[in-house]
Image (spheres, helix red, strand yellow):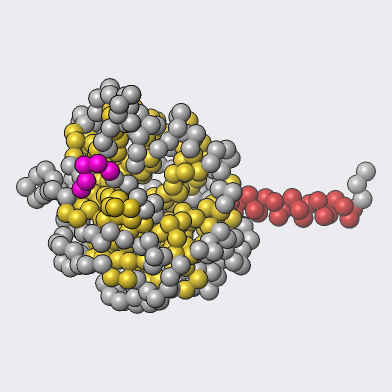
Amino acid sequence: MLDKGLRRLMKEFMGLSVVAVMLTALGISTATPALAAPTPLWGTVIGSNEDGRLEVFALSGDDTLYANFQLPSGGWNGWQRRDHVPAGVVTQGPIVRSNKDGRMEVFAGTADGRLYHMWQLAPNGGWSGWAQLGKWDLMTGLSVTTNLDGRIEVFLSDGADLWSVFQTSATSGTSWASLNLGRPTFTWLNNGAVAAAQNGDGRLEAFAVGCGIATPTNSCGMPGIYHKWQRSPGGEWSGWLPMSHCNETTLASITTAKNKDGRLELIEIMPTNNVYRGDFCHQWQLTTGGWSNFDNRGNGEIDTTAPVAIADNEDGRLEAFTVRGDGTIQHMWQTAVNGGWSGWDRLGTFTGFTRSGLGAGRNKDGRLEVVAIRGNGQPYHIWQTAKNGGWSDWAPLEAS
């Protein structure tokens, strides 16, 4: 029989365990925060809690997700370990989106075609572990957006077809379903980047990069961009249509943004005379319908293997951020809401930033904040000192 002392210790331990389980069920994290970033980190993205506090996510070298979030009292918590991706090597993501009830959800894809997600258990609260949403032969592109009714929808390319993986309802704990959106023609492979966004009227639109099937005399042909869209919010999909792009021989990546008036912009990073240096090209929906031609915003110094981050200022003007080949971060912005763009300007005085990660978000008070990774794998952040205004300089993103 157990003596009284041991029984008392077991009872206390069980009581603490029950409390921990109850806190987790309520979405309150019981994890111990790290005091410093477990460098090197990569793949930085920024999400927003339901109460407006920003949360930064990044992966470690072994594909463990870490997070650092703003505290209600101000400052930053410090890095917490979330969970290790169970299998495969992460090559897509992480991407963070918010559910209809404000709970954030993070997605990541692996080279061997596994789609993973993890989610907050309650708004502003703790987190689940990783769960697998599906498995394809491989994954060459990943994008996540939200339907008009609040349902999250994931788009991925398996090297041939575009797939949609979507929540069946906007309620917590909902199930997921998938749909093969196919490819433009049998001889076309969707084997590149993927982007998706919600139109101003709520219809989703998806974009996929691909090329013609390789032949003995053609190694996959010239790349191109195709798009398709929901015919009504949450409804059936159109067929595929081609889009123009900046350079008819090559392109590196695509991403989307939405103007304040609801019109989408498609951004393409196009390699120039060096495979690792490129231009920023964009194309936008016209108020009369259809799409503009691509406009090349230049400067030929963008690292084509680095992510592009875009955020909207408090007044609705879009602002874009890229990593230069010389290790600096640059930005440009719309000079008027729904309007044209400035030239490129250096962001902050620091150098040594790498292609490992770049994310942008907007604070509750309207100020933008950007996170990037320097050569030692340390995340740094920089922020507007006033909404729609100027910027601080870079500082390490740690507990503060």
Q: Nearer the viewer, residue 1 or 285?
A: 285
Q: Is residue 274 above or below residue 230?
A: below
Estimate the x, y position of residue 215 in percent, counting from the top left. 32, 24
Please say whether residue 351 is visible from this viewpoint: yes
Residue beneath the point at 25% across and 25% down: 185
Estimate the x, y position of residue 113 in percent, counting from the top left. 47, 34
- Residue 45: say if magenta: no
Task: Name the quadrant of the N terminus.
Answer: top right
Residue beneath the point at 34% across and 42% down: 193
Q: Is residue 87 above or below residue 216?
A: below
Give the prevailing secondary structure in the magenta stretch: loop
Residue beneath the point at 46% across and 67% down: 352
Estimate the x, y position of residue 300 in percent, counting from the top left. 28, 59
Q: Residue furthest front?
A: 217
Q: Nearer the viewer, residue 26 or 290?
A: 290
Q: Which quadrant of the structure image shows residue 212?
A: top left
Residue beneath the point at 36% across and 62% down: 324
Q: Which quadrant of the structure image shows residue 386?
A: bottom left
Magenta-drawn segment:
246-250
Please say whether residue 101 is visible from this viewpoint: no
Estimate the x, y position of residue 63 in percent, counting from the top left. 56, 48
The mark total stands at 0
